Image (cartoon, rainbow, N blue to C red):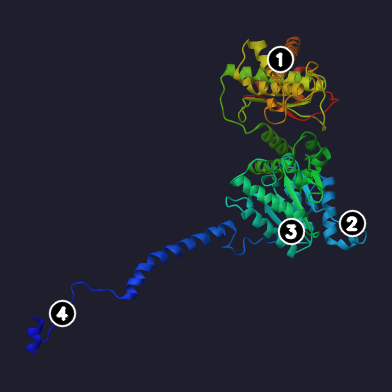
């Protein structure tokens, strides 16, 4: 047909039914999905690397020194821990004027470990160091180093110390170092444990390795120094280990003055008296106490904080928030006798802490509370005092049994306190003649793992039971002999619901005398 058309001079045009793509188009269509997939994975890898601090094999997280203008805490704001402040001041002084020490050949400590209970001022002391030192101050938390990807923590440690060396002389503060400084296990570790150990190894190398620098001082804080790796605590790494304890009475008064400096107070405020009835409270708890008192003053429309607000705030912090619960008359009476039993035994037992307040107003989880605090601090306890504590703890349960002939669930906290004290006396403090001067119950873990036999544990259980029963019998005899005092105290408590120390001793017909052996505060509560 095409030949005939050409012979007759006809123009023939043909269009294919299917258009064929060019080579370039075919190549683009085949490569495009792979290219998009590669670009997606590159974007995802870059994003993850930025979150992990690796920066896509580039620079990781940049550690910058703390801006001195943002730190408004100095050693003037640190009170109650003068000996710790003196140790840190020496480090700061060396970094300010190193030539004076180098002239004699003295070297600064490479590391200072601050350990102690929560709220004692470890982090505050580090902030004060940053405010006092005129050198770059780098702050890091242990949680910033630990990641799921192995090697990230060690990389961040290198970056932190490299930044500190660049700005040397400088100070590095690592908070909660026990998160990465725990003792290394001998077994094969994988995953997060392996990452933590690599991070610890990098810290050990940076602090006292071939790349160590004498112009960097490392401060670290922890609540658990007992779990730290020995290699971290040896001289050359953390040369000094300073324990920050709860302040004593003088220290508490100083801390209260620091925190009330920015609060309007009335002339009747007696911080020395307040410090005497707050033994065992840390700096953070005292700061919270002052703030609660200020909030109460605002709520009551007072122009300034008075002593009443401070005492009410202490009652709220120690005893809990008041609950609006209407108790039946029978249960209210039983609660009054329960708390009166605690208070009366606290007043009758020799050397017991003075009773400060009794209340049958429900607070927190308790239906009633008895607050006993000492006038001064005490750091050691003898066997007679501890037995008196157990006797006092059994007072509520014994009073209910004596008056009503029943035992209620309100004695749960008392049973827990008395049993715990008895177990510690027998199993840890060597106060049992039958067990002897040995420690049977370890601080942590199963005693059987330490080689204690089942027979010894049975003996401990029998001794604990005998000690508690002996103290319970003593409590029963005291309350039975002073039944009229118990009734008088319970009646006055039912009438007023809350009694202070003077009203308590008057209702019981007793004269308050200063205890020769002061002790830590205790609170007995009926739950």
Q: Alpha carbon of mark 2 to alpha carbon of mark 3: how far?
A: 22 Å
Q: Which residue is labeled 3 in the image?
A: 137
Of the two numbered discs 3 and 4 on the same chain, state the one appearing first in sequence: 4
Q: Which residue is labeled 1 in the image?
A: 462
Q: Alpha carbon of mark 2 to alpha carbon of mark 1: how far?
A: 58 Å
Q: Which residue is labeled 2 in the image?
A: 106
Number of marks in picture: 4
Q: Is residue 61 left or right of residue 279?
A: left
Of the two numbered discs 2 and 4 on the same chain, state the one appearing first in sequence: 4
Determine whether the residue tagged by mark 4 lies in a helix, strand or loop: loop
Picture coordinates of residue 201, whole percent (x, y): 70, 51
Tell me the quarter of the picture where residue 35 sits.
Answer: bottom left
Tell which tag, 1 or 3, sits nearer the viewer.
1
Of the two numbered discs 1 and 4 on the same chain, state the one appearing first in sequence: 4
Q: Alpha carbon of mark 1 to alpha carbon of mark 4: how far?
A: 110 Å
Of the two numbered discs 2 and 1 on the same chain, state the one appearing first in sequence: 2
Q: Alpha carbon of mark 2 to alpha carbon of mark 4: how far?
A: 100 Å
């Amino acid at each position: 047909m095409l030949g005939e058309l050409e012979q007759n001079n006809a123009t023939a045009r043909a269009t294919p039914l299917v258009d064929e793509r060019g080579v370039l188009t075919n190549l683009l269509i085949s490569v495009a999905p792979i290219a998009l997939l590669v670009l997606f994975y590159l974007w995802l890898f870059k994003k993850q690397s930025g979150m992990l601090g690796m920066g896509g094999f580039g620079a990781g997280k940049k550690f910058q020194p703390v801006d001195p203008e943002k730190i408004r805490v100095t050693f003037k704001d640190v009170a109650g821990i003068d000996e710790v402040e003196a140790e840190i001041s020496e480090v700061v002084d060396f970094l300010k004027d190193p030539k004076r020490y180098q002239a004699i050949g003295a070297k600064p400590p490479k590391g200072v470990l601050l350990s102690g209970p929560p709220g004692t001022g470890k982090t505050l002391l580090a902030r004060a160091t940053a405010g006092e030192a005129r050198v770059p101050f780098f702050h890091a938390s242990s949680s910033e180093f630990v990641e799921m990807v192995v090697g990230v923590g060690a990389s961040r440690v290198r970056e932190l110390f490299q930044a500190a060396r660049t700005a040397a002389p400088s100070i590095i503060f690592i908070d909660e170092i026990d998160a990465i400084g725990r003792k290394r296990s001998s077994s094969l570790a994988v995953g997060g444990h392996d990452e933590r150990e690599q991070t610890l190894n990098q810290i050990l190398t940076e602090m006292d390795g071939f790349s160590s620098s004498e112009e960097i001082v490392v401060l670290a804080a922890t609540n658990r120094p007992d779990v730290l790796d020995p290699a971290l605590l040896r001289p050359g790494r953390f040369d000094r280990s300073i324990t920050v304890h709860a302040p004593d009475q003088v220290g508490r008064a100083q801390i209260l003055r620091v925190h009330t400096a920015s609060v309007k107070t009335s002339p009747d405020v007696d911080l020395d008296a307040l410090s005497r009835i707050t033994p065992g409270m840390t700096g953070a708890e005292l700061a919270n106490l002052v703030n609660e008192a200020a909030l109460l003053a605002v709520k009551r429309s007072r122009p300034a904080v008075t002593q009443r607000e401070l005492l009410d705030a202490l009652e709220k912090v120690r005893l809990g928030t008041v609950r609006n619960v209407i108790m039946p008359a029978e249960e209210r009476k039983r609660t009054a006798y329960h708390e009166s039993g605690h208070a009366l035994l606290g007043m009758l037992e020799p050397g017991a802490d003075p009773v400060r307040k009794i209340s049958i107003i429900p607070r927190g989880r308790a239906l009633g509370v008895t607050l006993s605090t000492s006038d001064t601090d005490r750091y050691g306890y003898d066997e007679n005092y501890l037995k008196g504590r157990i006797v006092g703890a059994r007072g509520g349960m014994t009073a209910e049994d004596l008056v009503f002939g029943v035992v209620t669930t309100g004695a749960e906290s008392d049973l827990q306190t008395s049993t715990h004290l008895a177990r510690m006396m027998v199993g840890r403090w060597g106060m049992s003649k039958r067990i002897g001067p040995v420690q049977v119950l370890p601080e942590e873990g199963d005693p059987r793992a330490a080689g204690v036999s089942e027979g010894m544990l049975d003996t401990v259980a029998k001794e604990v039971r005998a000690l508690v029963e002996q103290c319970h019998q003593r409590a029963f005899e005291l309350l039975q002999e002073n039944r009229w005092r118990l009734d008088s105290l319970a009646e006055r408590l039912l009438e007023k619901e809350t009694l202070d120390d003077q009203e308590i001793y008057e209702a019981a017909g007793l004269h308050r005398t200063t205890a020769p052996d002061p002790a830590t505060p205790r609170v007995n509560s009926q739950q």
